[in-house]
Structure formats: C-alpha cells, structure tokens
Image (cartoon, rainbow, N blue to C red):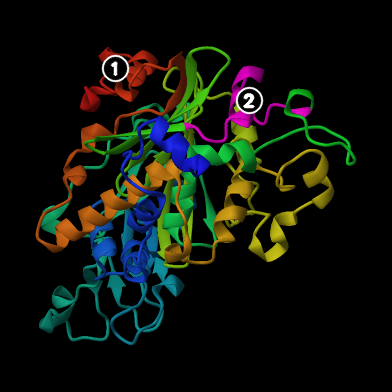
Amino acid sequence: MVPLLRRALTIGLVPAHTCLKKKREAAMLTAEDNRFLTESDAGTPMGEMIRRFWVPALLSEELPEADGAPKKITVLGEELLAFRDTKGRVGIIDQYCPHRGTNLWLGRNEECGIRCVYHGWKFDITGQCTDMPTSYPDLNAKDHMQIKAYPAREWGGMVWAYMGPAEKMPELPHMELALVPESHRFVSKKWQDCNWVQALEGSIDTAHFTYAHLVFDKKENEDLDLDKHLVMPINRMTGDLTRWIAKDPRPVIRVEPHAAGLVIGGGRVTETDDLYWRIAQYLMPFHTYTPSALPGQTIFGQTFVPYTDCNCWIYCYAWNPERPLTDDERHSYANGGAIFPEIDENYVPLRTKANNYMIDRKAQRTSSYMGIKGVSEQDAAVQDSQGEIQDRPREHLGPTDLGIMRFRKLVMDTARDLQAGIEPPAARAHEAYAVRSGACVTHKSKTLPDVMVERFGEATGLVSALL
C-alpha cells in the first residue's frame, strides 16, 4: 500500500474502501473548475461571491491627510481611485472622469471632492458630481451625473470597500484585530506575483513548515542531522515544538466548519501520547490566521485580495488581545520579522520573482532549507513558482491537503449557491469572525473541538460554533 494512503487510512481521513486512484480523481480540479476557483473579475461567479463581503482596498496610512494626494488602486480587476476628503472621510470611486475619460488621479482634492483638471468636473466620495463648469447652471446637469463609487469604511488600520449590490451590504466582519485598541495591533501589506488562491492555500497548509521554513546549522560537507543541527526558526518557539515540526512532515489533519469559515488543525506526534496541535483559521472569503500562537503570544493573520487574476495584495497583521505591542515587536515587523517581509516604500518585497528572491545556495546547504531569507519570502517563492495561476489539474493531493480540499469546496459551493440565488451565509455572520488561531499540546484522543476548548476556553465565545 502507498505510505501516504496507509497513514490516511490509519487516522481516518480516507475511507478504507477508497483506493488512491479514486481519491486523486475526486480531489483534482478540472481546467474549468480551476478557472471557476481563480477568476475574480466582475461577472465571474467567484468575483461576485467575493463582492458580497467587505474587501480591504488599501491601508489607512496610504491616505495620511485630508485633501491629500489621491491614490490609484486596483481591486478585483477594477481600476479605482481612493482619496481622503476635507472632512477626513475616504472615498473609493472610478478612476476616470465620465466627461472625456481623463484619469482623476491627476485631479485636485479640494473641498470634499476630486476636481478633474481637464474641464473642472468635480465628484464627492459617493461618486456624485457636485460641480460641472462646462454646463449651463440652469440645466442642473451635475445632479444627474454619477460615477461608480463604493462604500468605504476604516476598520483595523485598513480601508475596506463594499463592491456588491447596495441592498446586500453586510456589517464589517468582527475580526479581533479590528476590535482591540490600535496599540495592540500592527498592519501592513505586501505585493505577490501569483493568483490569490494559491497564496491563501499556502497559509492554511500547516504541513509545509517542516521543509519550507526549516532552519539548521551545519557545515557544507555534513549530512543534515535534525537532532544535532536543528535550530529554532522563530524565536518564540521552544526546542520541543521545533523538533516535533521538523520530525513529523505528515501531521494528522482535522477540519471543522463554523459560521465564518473553517478551523484547520494539524496534530504532530510527540514522544508521549500527546499531539502538538497547530490550529489555523480560514475566514470567508480570503482571510487566514496562522497556527503558531501559544497563550499570551501575539497572533498573526493575512488577507489575500486579488489585484488581477495573476497577482494580489496580501494584508499582513499582528495583534495581541492582552497587551500593547512593544516597540521592539513593531520594529521587527516593519523590517521583515515573523510573517512580514522586508518591503520598499511601495510595499513591494525586496526579494521577489524578479531577483529570484536573492536565493543563497550556500545558505541552502548550511543553514536554511530554502536558502531564502524570511518566512514570508519563502512562502512567496514557492507560491509564485507554481505559475501566475496554478495548473491544478496536474496536481496530486495527499492526506495533509485535506484543509486545501475543504477550502476549495467551501468557496466553490458558496459561489455556485450565489449563482442559484442563495446569498453567502458568512457575509451575515459578522460576529462569528471573532475567532483566534493558536497552538497547544494535548492528548491524542481529543477531537478538534475538544482541543479548541482546551486551548481557548468555552467562556471566550471563540469556539461556540463548534460546540
């Protein structure tokens, strides 16, 4: 029997009567399915489903002052313009003036509106024309001129846009990073050269940590010996946690649905009857929380927003529910620590596909499994290498990919339901987004809901959807 299938049968992920060939056929996507999953323009099923949710469009810090310079943005393939008006409110409108097509980025941000520099037409944050100097005043033509505009809200250090039907607009998701004081969080973003789906799938794949982020210290001519050479890749991880990750590349994967998405747990063997659980969160339609935080530690998350189908902005954030972040933590995150990459003034990582992520082949032999500096950069390298849009019909999934399979099924089923007139339930479940990810060590007999209660406690409300 194939080893991966044998383990899957042992831990109950694959029914005993299911052969490997049938399992692969069921997990693989067709080319049509892959297009369905990855296309996000207006009018596509997945794009319309995403537009039923609030979407991060840029960071609040990108519009630092009232009546300041506007900013060109592209979200879900749409070219838009963001600006902060005289009253400090953020507007997200069409980039182009409806008069003669001039780009409003050239415009003057003044007195609660953007004025086109070509003929002076002016638009407020709702897209309403408030002045039309080229028309006769008695015609009131400006009152009948409206350009595309999306509702915008500032929430958790980000500017969010709602791009769906006005009558379907939900509340903002109650993600904990937006509920804690500003002093308790850090928010940034990074550019990535691939489709949003494969970047997100990497973030909920707890198995890849064994190889992609492995750190060791040995001589070039030595064979890798984990007991001798292993070092901690993240300074908050103890030697035991690092060793368990390094030695067990096939964690037991358990997935549980809840109102906002999925809990994805990966349990690795220890030297006892306990499992080391790393618990990730996937929240509809494109948010994930990393699975490493122990009690009291800072939690990390990411939001994967399509720019076009071939690239995306990834919003990266850290928050601590119990205390303010320290100056040292903020400095680390701003300079490539934890899940954050080193970036330039435009939020583009210094290590990208264009420079081969500055891969160091000597370091790959002596200190880093990938030879690329930074956890974020390591993730980007493997995800970008799959192509701008991964060719999923060619892949062969295994038991550690259960979370990936369940994610795909959830978002594709939700998009298909929307085509049939059924609105996404998670869009209305804003309070269900107040969940956490984290890690713990507990007996192997525990179910994932039991593990969640042991880690987070029943009283927090963070696991109520599972009970």
Q: Is residue 73 visible?
A: no
Q: Are marks 2 and 1 in contact (CB under 8 Å)?
A: no
Between the C-alphas of marks 2 and 1, the distance is: 28 Å
Residue 327's spot in the image, x, y percent?
61, 26
Is 283 positioned to the left or the right of 428 in the image? Answer: right
Q: Write down the quadrant of residue 328 in the picture.
A: top right
List x then y, in percent, for residue 78. Answer: 35, 69
Q: Residues within 10 Å of mark 1 (few under 14, many from 20)?
A: few
Image point 36% across, 65% down: which residue?
34
Judging depth in this view, the residue of 199 and 243 nearest the camera is 243
Left or right of residue 24: residue 294: right
Q: Residue at x 32, y 14 (%)?
A: 457
Task: Choose between 134 and 287: the one closer to the eye.
Answer: 287
Q: Is residue 450 above or below residue 19?
A: above
Residue 247 magenta-highlighted: yes
Residue 458: percent from left, percent from top: 27, 14
User: Would you identify the image quadrant in which residue 37 lies?
Assistant: bottom left
What is the three-letter code of the residue carrying label 1?
Thr
- Determine whether the residue tagged by mark 2 lies in a helix, strand or loop: helix
- Say few, some or many: other residues with alpha carbon within 10 Å of mark 2 (under 14 / 14 to 19 / 20 or more): some
Q: Magenta part of the protein: which range? A: 229-251
Q: Which mark is residue 460?
A: 1
Residue at point 41% right, 41% down?
Answer: 288
Q: Residue 71's mark?
A: none
Q: Mark 2 — residue?
A: 242
Viewer-closest of 220 and 233: 220
Q: Amino acid at mark 2?
A: Thr
